[in-house]
């Protein structure tokens, strides 16, 4: 019985941590979008997936395009926006923030 309660408690804690991560990923996306400058000639519908390395405190120490849009200028503009958005918002809980040292997210300007 105690094992079941412990498992339920662990599952609740995991769900809460994932909720914090999801909330902060949305905040990061918003901050990157605010720092993004649309390059001339960039067509609608472009998107790319970015991997970001973050140190405690939220400073960005690495940005890599892991799935490009097919438009190198657009991809570079997203990379630049991520760097300009530093420091990124992280959860207050150090254990949850530690799980966000490396994040991947899709950047879709129209989203």
Image (tube, grey):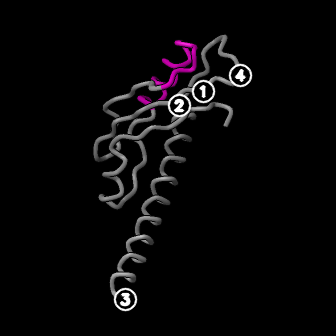
The vertical placement of 95 against 9, above or below, is above
The vertical placement of 47 against 4, above or below, is above
Given contact means CB atoms under 8 Å apart, are the residues at marks 3 and 4 in contact?
no
Tell me the SS state at disc 2.
Answer: loop
Q: CA distance from mark 4 to mark 1?
A: 9 Å
The residue at 49%/47% (across/down) is 25
Location of residue 85 in the rendering, given as x and y in whole percent from the top left corner: 45, 34
- The answer to which of marks 3 and 2 sits earlier in the sequence is 3
Location of residue 70 in the rendering, given as x and y in whole percent from the top left corner: 57, 15
The residue at 51%/30% (across/down) is 49
Location of residue 15 in the rendering, given as x and y in whole percent from the top left corner: 47, 65
Q: CA distance from mark 2 to mark 4?
A: 18 Å
In this view, the residue in front, 20 or 57, is 20
Q: What is the span of residues highlighted in magenta in the rendered image?
A: 67-84
Question: Residue at label 1?
Answer: 47
- The answer to which of marks 1 and 2 sits earlier in the sequence is 2
Tell me the SS state at disc 3.
Answer: loop
Question: Residue at label 3?
Answer: 1
Quarter the N terminus occupies: bottom left
Q: CA distance from mark 3 to mark 4?
A: 55 Å
Look at discs 3 and 4 and give the one toward the viewer: 3
Left or right, residue 38 beside residue 57: right
Quarter the C terminus occupies: top right
In this view, the residue in front, 89 or 76, is 76
């Amino acid at each position: 019985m105690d094992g079941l309660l412990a498992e339920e408690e662990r599952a609740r804690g995991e769900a809460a941590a994932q909720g914090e991560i999801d909330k902060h990923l949305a905040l990061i996306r918003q901050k990157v979008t605010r720092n993004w400058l649309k390059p001339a000639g960039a067509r609608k519908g472009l998107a790319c997936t970015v991997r970001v390395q973050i140190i405690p405190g939220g400073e960005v120490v690495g940005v890599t395009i892991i799935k490009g849009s097919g438009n190198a200028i657009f991809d570079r503009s997203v990379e630049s926006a991520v760097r300009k958005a530093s420091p990124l918002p992280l959860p207050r809980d150090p254990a949850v923030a530690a799980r966000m040292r490396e994040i991947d997210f899709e950047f879709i300007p129209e989203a």
